[in-house]
Image (cartoon, grey):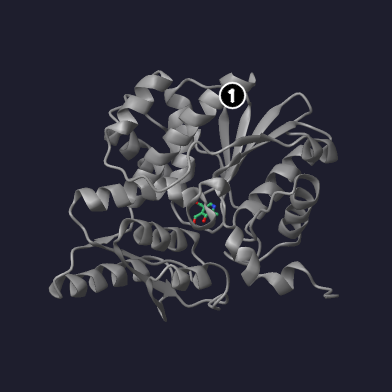
């Protein structure tokens, strides 16, 4: 185990850039708790991380772009689904730091100039939607594309697995240290943290809470089916422990992650997600997103209704952002238009 000070000290030793607004708020949600008949719900507002509408990737990019700058890169190459929040936040971080940004995005059902894809263009990134599926093929394409940029004299850094996932886990141990401090300030000791993740976010939450010896247990809701996810999350957590010089080790049984709320596929709405989005917006004025946090909130609501959490429990919901994607789902979200 380590103290909060020691964890923060070790984090401060890792190359990083200053791109976000931290700490993000930890906000009590009494009207949401009441609507659900308990437990005490707090939302950790990673959607308020400052850069270009925020999200969990700002914290993560603090270290991935820190790594790139440390290696002397002048260009970032990234790519994922066409409404990727990660890519939008990377584009904005590059603008802020004066780096070039190339985004190669996989064509899918939401390749429309709205939401994140619109913001990628506004941030001045070089954007191309490619006919390559999101996954290992796209990762390979990004690496090949970077080789071409290198031949043209640029110094590219590719945001890809497994380094990016390990640095995301580093970032979320920092988020845990913030929560640890904020809990002490407001006098709570939460039982659970719920989040949407199938990677570094969960890895960092599990590593950070274990390293600090906290009661807080992590339950994550996957936004996408990912073969071998538990091993991948565990590896990311232990790589982060190595980077941070921590003795703590995460084992597979520490990783609680469900596929039950994905619905038809990644990026497709579910009725439960829409209901969760509307409930949180109408009780607390907090906007979730259609791809990640809406589904994670649907999971939390289900667990409360099933009695897995009761009114004496305290839960932190990690709002990982993603709100720009709402605008790419306008028709599915509000079926009856009466403008
Ligand atoms: C809004 C939002 N929430 C959650 C996640 C999941 O993060 P990860 O699976 O990388 O931990 C992402 C990733 O793209 C995201 O954009």
Residue labelled 1 has its Cβ within 8 Å of some atom of ligand 1 = no
Does 210 sit left or right of 27 as displayed?
A: left
Within 10 Å of the Cα at label 1, are there few (<14), some (14-19), or many (20+) other Cα atoms? some
Q: Position of residue 271 (x, y in %)?
A: 76, 61
Q: Quadrant of residue 5?
A: top left
Q: Quadrant of residue 75?
A: bottom left
* Nearer to the camera, 110 or 131: 110
Residue at the spot 41% in from the left edge and 47% down from the top edge: 60
From the viewer's perspective, is residue 324 above or below residue 82? above
Q: Position of residue 204 (x, y in %)?
A: 44, 38
Residue at the spot 80% in from the left edge and 51% down from the top edge: 282
**Mark 1 sits on what residue?**
183
Q: Quadrant of the C terminus?
A: bottom right
Numbered circles on residues, count: 1
* Nearer to the camera, 197 or 98: 98
Q: Position of residue 233 (x, y in %)?
A: 43, 44
Can residue 307 be seen from the camera position used here? Answer: yes
Q: Quadrant of the N terminus?
A: top left
Q: Position of residue 40 (x, y in %)?
A: 74, 30
Can residue 234 be seen from the camera position used here? Answer: no
Under tag 1, what secondary structure?
helix
Residue found farthest to the bottom: 131
Does 182 sit left or right of 231 as displayed?
A: right
Residue at the spot 34% in from the left edge and 37% down from the top edge: 240
From the viewer's perspective, is residue 93 above or below residue 256? below
């Amino acid at each position: 185990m380590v103290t909060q000070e020691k964890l923060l000290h070790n984090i401060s030793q890792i190359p990083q850039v200053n791109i976000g607004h931290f700490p993000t708020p930890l906000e009590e949600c009494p009207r949401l708790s009441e609507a659900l008949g308990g437990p005490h719900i707090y939302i950790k507002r990673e959607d308020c991380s400052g850069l270009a509408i925020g999200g969990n990737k700002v914290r993560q990019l603090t270290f991935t772009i820190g790594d790139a700058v440390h290696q002397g890169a002048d260009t970032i190459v990234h790519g994922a689904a066409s409404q990727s929040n990660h890519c939008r936040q990377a584009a904005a971080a590059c603008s802020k730091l004066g780096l070039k940004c190339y985004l190669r995005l996989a064509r899918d059902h939401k390749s429309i100039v709205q939401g994140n894809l619109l913001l990628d263009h506004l941030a001045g990134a070089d954007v191309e939607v490619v006919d390559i599926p999101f996954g290992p093929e796209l990762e390979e394409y990004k690496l090949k594309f970077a080789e071409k940029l290198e031949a043209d004299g640029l110094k590219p850094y590719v945001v890809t697995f497994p380094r990016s996932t390990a640095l995301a886990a580093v970032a979320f141990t920092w988020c845990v240290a913030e929560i640890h401090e904020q809990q002490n300030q407001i006098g709570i000791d939460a039982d659970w943290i719920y989040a949407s993740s199938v990677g570094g976010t969960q890895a960092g939450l599990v590593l950070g809470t274990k390293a600090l010896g906290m009661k807080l247990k992590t339950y994550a809701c996957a936004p996408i089916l990912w073969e071998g996810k538990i091993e991948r999350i565990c590896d990311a957590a232990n790589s982060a422990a190595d980077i941070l010089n921590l003795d703590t080790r995460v084992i597979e049984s520490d990783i609680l992650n469900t596929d039950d709320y994905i619905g038809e596929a990644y990026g497709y709405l579910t009725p439960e997600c829409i209901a969760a989005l509307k409930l949180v917006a109408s009780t607390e004025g907090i906007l979730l997103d259609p791809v990640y946090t809406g589904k994670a909130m649907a999971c939390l609501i289900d667990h409360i209704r099933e009695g897995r959490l009761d009114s004496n429990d305290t839960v932190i919901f990690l709002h990982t952002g993603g709100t720009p994607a709402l605008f790419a789902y306008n028709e599915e979200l509000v079926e009856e238009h009466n403008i």
